Image: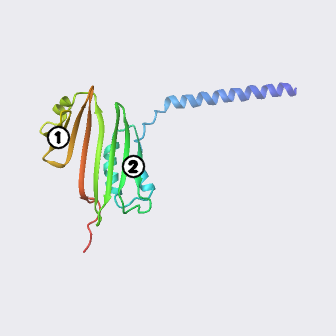
Amino acid sequence: MRRALMNLHRVLLGSTLVACSAVAHAQGVLVPPRQAAAPVNSLAAAAANVGLKRCLPALQRLSSAAVQGAKSNDVLLDWDRKRTNDSATFAMIGMEYANGGAAMSITAIPEADVACSVQAERISVAPFTCQSVAQQELVGYRQTQLLPNFAVYTDGKDPTSSVSLIDSPPGCLVIRRYVEFNWKDPAAAPARR
């Protein structure tokens, strides 16, 4: 009798597990899959985590633009740990996109007032010739040929930015550069006098 009860207990337990797994499987089929959340902005998170405050809005703004549309990103961050908010911050963000990758180097330097001077370079490779990249993306830009394989393009409407194209067969190395001295956070309240 005891053996029969143990066998009955095993059968009931086994059928309960099968039923539970069938319900769990049905719920997985019926519930639509969650959309992948946008990746965390690694630079903004790391800068905030280590206590950078002075140029944080500039770092956040530039890195947010960089990681937009990326599947994932990660960062190398360097700063003076003895003078966290009074020295330069250097960052290199790696970004993974559905069709490839890119890197962005960002430097932020606190100025004497609440401003920061910033420099950012987004580096990618286009699977086309530099001439075709220029014809498609840089119409109306002024070209300066620095070397036979290296041209810099500028737009008079945006004097703090440039695009460098470096022939690297079979593709083109593209470096988009932005520089601004004395950048101030437009969201910050103006100083009272």
Residue 185: x and y, percent? 28, 59
Q: Does residue 141 appear anywhere in the picture?
A: no
- Position of residue 34 relative to residue 77, above or below, is above
Checking the image for residue 153, the label placed there is 1
In the image, what residue occupies the spot 16% across and 49% down? Answer: 159
Q: Secondary structure at mark 1?
A: strand
Which quarter of the figure is the N terminus placed in?
Answer: top right
Q: Give the residue number, with chain letter if any, for mark 2.
A: 43
Q: Nearer the viewer, residue 23 or 158?
A: 158
Q: Secondary structure at mark 2?
A: helix
Q: Does residue 78 appear anywhere in the picture?
A: yes
Residue 91: x and y, percent? 37, 49
Left or right relative to 141: residue 61? right
Please state which amino acid type lies under the numbered disc 1: Tyr
Location of residue 172 (image quadrant)? top left
Left or right relative to 186: residue 37? right
